[in-house]
Structures are given as structure tokens and as C-alpha cells.
Amino acid sequence: MENQEQQASAADTLTQAIASKLDYLSTLQAAVQHGDDRNVYELLDQVRYYQEVKKTRATRTVNHLAELVDNIHPQISHYLSDNLIDYLGHIYPFFYYEEYTTGLFHIYFGNWWDRRLFGDLDVINVKFEFDQKEYQKLKDSFALEAHGQRLNTAQIESISGQSEQLQSLVDAQTTRDNQKADLREQLKENSSKSSMPWDSGKLKDERQDIIDELTKLADEDEKALNAHKAIKENDDKILVLSKEDTILNYEKQSIRDAFDDFEHFEAHNTSLYADYLNSLLGKSEGEVTVDD
């Protein structure tokens, strides 16, 4: 008798667990059918929803029902992306999105030439996952602007300085040729001098100094010979860096037009989940919830 009661109790527990899963899935299905994206987000992460949207500290036990749909996140993301991207288009008019595979989206900054791949959009979590290298360039560019500089100002100045030095070597070719002729004459005189044994050390040092100077001039000749190629390579580097600065200026102006400054842009990024879900309140046909 006791064993039968235990079996009945186990069956009831299992039935209840299965019912909870079915209730969760049917509630999620109903939310999708009713176009209730807000409720879909709540069902995907109830704890976060209550913390960030409802701003409540009410204790809600963490269930794992959302794990039931982990393997269909791409399809859920694809479904949710339409309304989210439409919303983002008004708040972030300079971002463009490409669904490169089901439910996964690249973010591009701008619609101009040479626009940058800026990261990815996490639709499920309503979050930008920016490329940290590209994001840091933009952030640094704003900071440097306060000092009247662009991101690549220092690097361009350094490369330009190298080109000026190379051009100086080219321009000084005649002067070097004259110096080499004089040094060769000095070397000839040094070699032809006869000396007492106590003078040999001094002559040897003079000869080495002359040879060292000729070697230095020969090195400069070689650099001057390759200078035009190096200057062209430097010009190409400067062009790439200048283009990047131009793109960054477009990006900075786009952010100012939408958010006034970079700090407000970052603040909006931080509150994006709550802002978006609050914008969905009252837009659904009806709010359907499932208990923990």
C-alpha cells in the first residue's frame, strides 16, 4: 500500500514537471502567435526582465524552463529581429545590420564608402557586441578631438617626418659626393705618408676615422637610392590613416546628431534592453505570462 502511494506521488511529481514544461512552451507559442515580443523576452529571461524592466526586487526563483528553447535561439532571434531592428533604426540611424546566418547579425557603421564592420547584434539579449578594437578607435578619437587632434595625427606626423628625412638624403646627394671625394683624397694622403714608429698609431686612427665616415656616407647613398620607393610606401600609409580619420569623423558626427556626445551614446547602449522592452509595453494584443 505504501509502495503504491509512493509510486502515485512520483507520478504526480513527474506529471506536474511535464505540465510546467508544456505550459511554458504553449505560453511562448501564444506570445509569438499574438506578436507579443515583450512577453517572449520575459519568458526567455524572467529574472532579468523583472530586474531591469519592472524594477522590482521581488524574489523570483530561477527556473530552467527557458533552456527548453536554447536549441532554437536562431529561429527566435530571427523572429524578434524585425521589430528590434526597426526600433534601433530610429534610435541608432547610423547602424546597419546584415543577417549573415539565421538569427545572427553583423553591425555596420554607416552607409558610406569604406564603412566599417563594427560588431554584432545580440537579438536575444538586446545587446550590441562591438568589435573592441574598432570601438576603442572611436572612443579615442572623441578624446583626442578635445586636444585638436585626430586618431592618427601622431602617426601621420611621424611617417611624414621619415619621408622628409629621406627626401633630405636625396637632395644632399651632390654634397655627399663632394664629401666622399675629399675623404678619398685624405685617405690617399694618409696612406702615402711615411712616419716614424711613434706616429703610426695616430695615422692609423686617422685612417679609420676616414673609413668610418666614408662608410656612413655610403649607407646614406643606399638609403637615398631606395628613398623614392620608401617615400611612396609612406604616402600610401598616410593615405590609409587619413581615410580612417575621415571615416571616424563621419562616425563622430553621426553620434553627435543622434546623441549629442559619446557619453550619451554609451548610456543608451547600457540601458538598451530596458528601453526597448519598455517601448513594447501595451503594444501586444494581450499579456500572457507563465508562473515560475
Image (spheres, grey):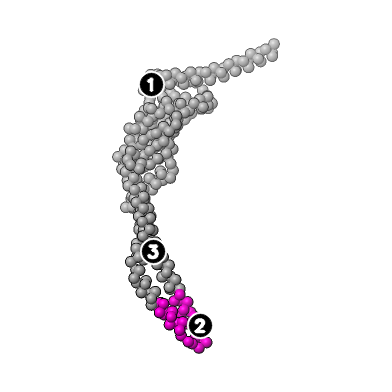
Q: CA distance from mark 2 to mark 1?
A: 99 Å
Would you say residue 72 sits in the magenta stretch? no
- In the image, residue 194 lies in the stretch drawn in magenta: yes
**Image marks 3 and 1: residues in contact by CB distance under 8 Å:** no
Residue located at (67% from left, 12% from top): 4
Q: Residue at x 38, y 34 (%)?
A: 97
Label 1 Cα neighbours within 10 Å, binned few <14 / some 14-19 / many ≥20: some
Q: Which residue is mark 3?
A: 225
Measuring from the top left, give residue 47's x and y in whole percent.
48, 28
Residue 197 to residue 100: above or below: below
- The amino acid on which the numbered mark 1 sits, given as a three-letter code, is Ser
Residue 203, compared with residue 221, is above or below; it is below
Residue highlighted by disc 2: 201
Query: Where residue 192 sits in the image (x, y, percent)?
Result: 45, 84
Please, is residue 73 above or below residue 264 in the view?
above
Image quadrant for the N terminus? top right
